[in-house]
Image (cartoon, rainbow, N blue to C red):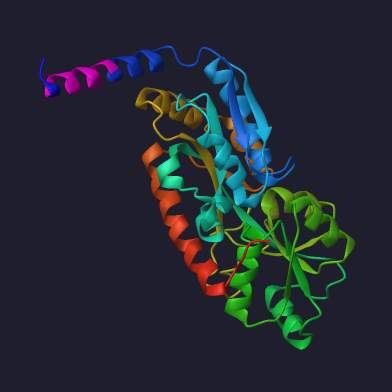
Amino acid sequence: MTLGARALLLQLVMLCAAAAQAQGFPDKPLRMIVPYSVGSPPDILGRIAASRLQAGLGQPVVVENRPGAAGTIGLAELSHQPADGYTLLALAMPSSVAPALYPQSGNDLERDCRAVGQMVFSYNVLVVHPDVPARSVAGLVAALKANPGRYSFGSGGNGTPAHLAGELFRQETGAAAQHVPYNQLPQAVADLVAGRLQFMFLASAAAVPQVAARRLRALAVTGPRRLEVLKDTPTMVEAGFPDFLIRDWQGLVVRAGTPDGVVERLNAELNRAMALPEVRAQLGKIGAEPATGSARAFDELIASEVRRWGRLVKEAGIKPD
């Protein structure tokens, strides 16, 4: 047998093995790594998806939190797992910042991961502590300019959505405000509610309950339209900032090299889960929107976001915590 024939035979054997693996998938529990803390917006959304995937796949989907370093700890954990689809990673927007923020980590989303599909889009809400006199975005900008150095905003760490939104806000308004990074987002929220911070661009899943309880006041949302749960809160575009559109996103990836059939099964079940009326209603209560689609479309979104936020990290000189 010639060398070329042997190579072709090996490829056929590998394809047959992959097809057999996909046909019997899954035949054991799956694991979903959430690279963010328990109770954070990505954790909340990941658990919603896990519960529905579990029903569709007929196997338990166990959520495991591996927070830290803009998701790179979770990414590293995924890279050490077999490329068989049994380990999923709940990838969210902050992970697209990681290549620019932690270049020494060696993580490469396009090289190390294979997209399964997107789950949701969600948006940030510009919120202030009730003691802040501003009742609009323009009012907040005026207060910041009149009191340089007095106001501060928090985030769950450098490079997180709350930080990036705050940096864009400072760039577009020229207003002075101090950024205070926290190890975890819930700590920042607690200090904002306590009045130790004055404002924040907070993920809708975390903002909506605080606004409903009147512990925080909403000034604007960063999406293209108003949120159903915050009907009286304008968008940043309506508030006079036509270029201020920020979408958080979240989806699932597996390790690169996972067979096509496995990815296709996971994508189909994920799309089915996110289209369920009860899931759409559950997401709507926290200001999130289901976002179904192909694995390729999610791959393209990840690549575009890596480029977008990489530019901002460079321009703003953002460094790790």
What x and y, as percent, mark residue 176?
Answer: 70, 81
Is residue 131 depicted above or below 261 in this figure? Answer: below
Q: Quadrant of the C terminus?
A: bottom right
What x and y, as percent, mark residue 115?
Answer: 44, 38
In reply to whether residue 8 is colored magenta, the answer given is: yes
Is residue 260 depicted above or below 235 in this figure? Answer: above
- Asked where in the image residue 6 lies, by quadrant, the reply is top left
Can residue 220 be spotted in the picture?
Answer: yes
- Asked where in the image residue 142 lies, by quadrant, the reply is bottom right
Which residue appears at 47% of the width and 56% of the height?
305
In reply to whether residue 167 is colored magenta, the answer given is: no
What x and y, as percent, mark residue 120?
Answer: 55, 43
Is residue 7 depicted above or below 198 in this figure? Answer: above
Q: What stretch is highlighted in magenta?
A: 4-13
> Which is more toward the observer, 23 or 232?
23
> Which is more toward the observer, 309 or 265?
309
> Which is more toward the observer, 53 or 225?
53
Is residue 16 depicted above or below 187 in this figure? Answer: above
Which residue appears at 51% of the width and 36% of the height?
79
